[in-house]
Amino acid sequence: AQTVTQSQPEMSVQEAETVTLSCTYDTSENNYYLFWYKQPPSRQMILVIRQEAYKQQNATENRFSVNFQKAAKSFSLKISDSQLGDTAMYFCAFMKHGAGGTSYGKLTFGQGTILTVHP
Amino acid sequence: GAGVSQSPRYKVAKRGQDVALRCDPISGHVSLFWYQQALGQGPEFLTYFQNEAQLDKSGLPSDRFFAERPEGSVSTLKIQRTQQEDSAVYLCASSPRLAGFNEQFFGPGTRLTVL
């Protein structure tokens, strides 16, 4: 079974500054996907960024980037130029790779990190 | 609508009542997931449908939980004889093809409170 750990229950950052959210995971799988999802207060969860484990290059999406360390099983999210709209709960999630099978497509989430961006 | 919708948004049930939660995925999406999110926690997988076939129900916590997607579109999660520990937000997500690297699109959730 896979586990995902987010060790920072809460983080805060000033607007326009940079913040990094931590995530570690435990798995015996070699091929998998990793995701960061954002859940704003009382709003739907949306995908922020995703990474394929076989790709060594870190994924980037505008102000969002990841630091993927496969050997260390670490997948942190860096938010640059933080904006007030980034205030949300952030979840790191793991998905096993493979066609068919009972785990295909199933996301395993961490406990979440509440990020507050201050003006 | 453009997104995943769920109804009702809020449900209060007395312990022992049966409830039914509905999910309308994005039209044409093949994959549909149900997750349970306790207060302040991350979502936990309940079950997965590929079209009308329920391929994984390993996360359903007890036989009081039942899900269906008879025509491969709308899905219903039913909880029989609700207990206080069933109180949570129930999230539905859909994906356009077989999941994996494809994004899962989440609905707003149904907040169930069992008194």
Image (cartoon, grey):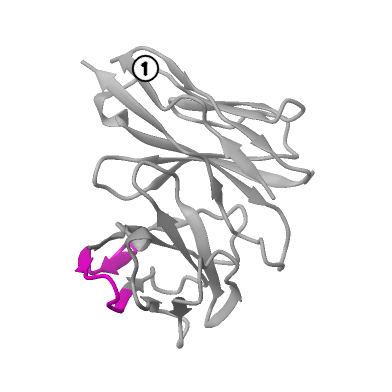
Residue under the point 45% across and 59% down? B35
Nearest the eye: B56 or A45? B56
A44 over A54 or under it: above or below: below
At horizontal 64% and vertical 36% (from top left) the residue drawn is A25
Q: Which amino acid does label 1 sit on?
A: Asp
Foreground pick, A61 / A85: A85
Give residue B83's position: percent from left, percent from top: 34, 67
Q: Name the residue under label 1.
A: A81
Instruction: Tell me if residue A40 is in the magenta stretch.
Output: no
Q: Where is residue A65 in the image (x, y as percent from the top left)?
A: 52, 26
Name above or below for residue B44 compared with residue A60.
below
| Crowdedness near tag 1: few (<14), some (14–19) or many (≥20) residues, C-alpha within 10 Å | some
Q: In this view, does B20 lie to the left or right of A33?
A: left
Q: Position of residue A53 (x, y in %)?
A: 71, 39
Is A107 left, or right, of B81 in this rendering?
right
Residues in magenta, as a range: B1-21
